[in-house]
């Protein structure tokens, strides 16, 4: 029975969360783009994160006569978390504050995507900051799961 539960949980996690080779973490959402973005924004506020802006790329495309499937970007952060990471390697500031992209693919599936903290480690050659990266990794996974789950 335990093996069956483990197989089910592993299958569920693999179907809802994928880390691509390009450093993106993609989490399948059970909600629309707008609802997922609304949920994420609310969760971030409750967790003390600052939401700097929310960009609706589909609306922007419409303004120039183009069409784009629903696509929203939320830019957020907290100096208590970002500053220690920048103290490890200042160039990581290029990728901060954090960004979450909520988007609909060609089949209508909604995804929440963000940069993997491990990708940031490699991209910026960060060393000696494992504790901070671990906190960021857990926080992003929790935010993503809460915003996308049923």
Image (cartoon, grey):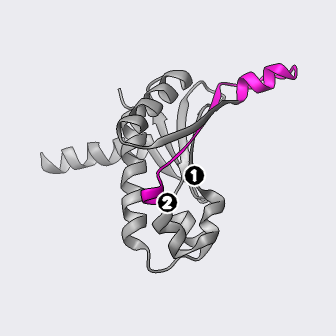
Q: Residues within 10 Å of mark 1 (few under 14, many from 20)?
A: some
Distance CA(mark 2)–CA(mark 1): 7 Å
10 within the magenta span: no
Q: Secondary structure at mark 2?
A: helix
Left or right: 25, with 42 as reference point = right
- Asked if marks 2 and 1 touch (Cβ < 8 Å), the reply is yes
- Residue ID for mark 2: 82
Whether 23 is drawn above or below 58: the answer is below
**Residue reaching furthest to the left:** 1
- Could you tell which of marks 2 and 1 lies nearer the N-terminus? 2
| Image location (x, y in percent) of residue 18 | 49, 49
- Quarter holding the N terminus is top left
Residue at x 62%, y 62% (from the top left corner): 93
Q: Which residues are magenta?
A: 57-81
- Residue ID for mark 1: 97
Residue at x 73%, y 22% (from the top left corner): 59
**Residue 135 in view, yes or no:** yes
Whether 6 is drawn above or below 52: the answer is below
């Amino acid at each position: 029975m335990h093996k069956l539960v483990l197989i089910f949980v592993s299958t569920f996690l693999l179907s809802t969360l994928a880390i691509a080779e390009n450093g993106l973490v993609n989490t399948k959402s059970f909600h629309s783009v707008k609802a997922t973005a609304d949920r994420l924004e609310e969760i971030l506020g409750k967790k003390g994160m600052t939401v700097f802006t929310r960009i609706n790329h589909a609306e922007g495309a419409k303004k120039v006569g183009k069409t784009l499937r629903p696509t929203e970007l939320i830019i957020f952060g907290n100096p208590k978390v970002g500053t220690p990471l920048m103290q490890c390697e200042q160039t990581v500031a290029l990728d901060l504050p954090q960004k979450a992209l909520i988007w609909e693919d060609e089949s209508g599936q909604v995804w929440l995507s963000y940069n993997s903290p491990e990708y940031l480690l490699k991209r910026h050659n960060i060393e000696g900051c494992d504790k901070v990266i671990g906190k960021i990794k857990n926080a992003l996974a929790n935010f993503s799961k809460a915003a996308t789950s049923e």
